[in-house]
Image (cartoon, rainbow, N blue to C red):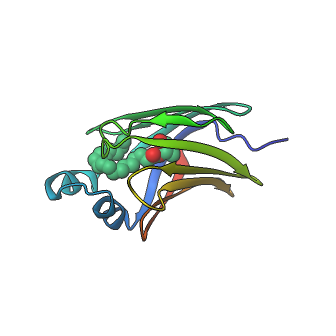
Amino acid sequence: MPVDFSGTWNLVSNDNFEGYMVALGIDFATRKIAKVLKPQKVIKQDGDSFHIHTTSTFRDYLLEFKVGQEFEEDNKGLDNRKCKSLVTWENDKLVCVQTGEKKNRGWTHWLEGDDLHLELRCENQVCRQVFKRA
Ligand code: YOG
């Protein structure tokens, strides 16, 4: 059985989100608001088809993709840069490479015990987020 990330997940820890946002060029005022948010992720997975909705009191972000199929991502409401994104499986980890203006940009999701992990990468910064089921 493949991994199933489906569910509603609440952020419980967010290590170096500030460094990640600085690397993305997010301005000070926006970072101040963003760093106190406790976003929720609603993930709907049907095999290799994903719908990941990240919601917060400030902004929402919806991403839909199929594993192995490159797509244009607009990062609207985040840093607003466009990139080409490709998500693949690396064993049970879901790995996204976001090719564009920013070097080394991407993220990885995996499950560990009852927790959902997300590593966000941009340039030389790594943000580590942990979510628990709502
Ligand atoms: O997740 O791409 O699950 O898309 C990254 C925020 C903050 C807005 C959130 C809103 C990057 C202001 C999405 C936070 C900082 C700061 C809630 C991470 C940029 C702007 C939306 C992400 C993937 C994997 C799916």
Name the image quarter holding the N terminus.
Answer: top right
Instruction: Tell me if 97 is positioned left or right of 13 in this view.
Output: right
Nearest the viewer among 37 and 120 is 120
Instruction: Judge whether 79 appears above or below 13 on screen.
Output: above
Quarter holding residue 56: top left
* Residue 111: image location, x then y, percent: 66, 53
Instruction: Tell me if 115 is positioned left or right of 33 in this view.
Output: right
* Residue 109: image location, x then y, percent: 60, 52
Instruction: Judge whether 28 appears above or below 66 on screen.
Output: below
Instruction: Tell me if 57 is positioned left or right of 128 in this view.
Output: left
Seen from this angle, which residue lies furthest left? Answer: 29
Seen from this angle, which residue lies furthest bottom? Answer: 124
Res. 116 in view: no
* Residue 84: image location, x then y, percent: 50, 42
Tell me what residue is drawn at x 77 percent, y 54 percent: 91
Nearest the viewer among 40 and 27 is 27
The mark tally for this picture is 0
Tell me what residue is drawn at x 36 percent, y 62 percent: 20
Res. 129 in view: yes
* Residue 22: image location, x then y, percent: 28, 63
Instruction: Tell me if 11 is positioned left or right of 115 in this view.
Output: left
Nearest the viewer among 134 and 37 is 37
Seen from this angle, which residue lies furthest front? Answer: 101
Tell me what residue is drawn at x 71 percent, y 40 percent: 4
Nearest the viewer among 123 and 92 is 123
Tell me what residue is drawn at x 33 percent, y 36 percent: 76
